[in-house]
Image (tube, rainbow, N blue to C red):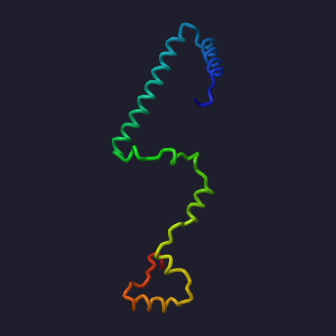
Amino acid sequence: MFGLTFDKLLVIGVIAVFLLGPERLPHYASQLAKLVRNVRTMANGAKDRLRDEMGPEFDDVDWKKLDPRQYDPRRIIREALIDDEPDDDVALVRPSGESAYAKRQRLLDEGKDAPFDTEAT
């Protein structure tokens, strides 16, 4: 928990006893317990509200996959560049030795629509 070991917590506790004194320590300990309880209740409430708003898809989300510590740019680029299934549209773009005009005419003669690039200006 936040890199705190038992030894560090013990040292913090001893320092708190000296700074607060034995009279005020129980009061502040109960305040800390209430704070922890309230934070836990708020976190559970936020999780329940998120589950209610997202609906049944909330349980299907793979939270480990969305963890930023799992981010590996090399893997993401490798997966983006390796395409196992060729697209039908890609075959129209690859050079086949046929001019664009001849390819357009051939497609129109076969009764197919000519390729149209929606991103072209």
Q: Residue at position x 51%, y 16% from top?
A: 29
Quick check: 62 above or below 15?
A: below
Locate the N terminus and report the quarter of the image it occupies.
top right
Give the farthest residue toward the top: 23
Name the spot of residue 39 as percent of width and height, x first. 45, 29
Q: Residue at position x 58%, y 13% from top?
A: 20
Give the farthest residue toward the front: 84
Name the spot of residue 9 as percent of width and height, x first. 62, 21
Name the spot of residue 97 as percent of width and height, x first. 57, 88
Q: Residue at position x 48%, y 78% from top?
A: 120
Quick check: 79 above or below 54?
A: below
> 117 or 28: which is nearer to us?
117
> 47 or 94: which is nearer to us?
94
Quick check: 87 above or below 43?
A: below
Name the spot of residue 75 as percent of width and height, x first. 60, 56
Quadrant hosting residue 112:
bottom left
Mark count:
0
Q: Residue at position x 52%, y 80% from top?
A: 93
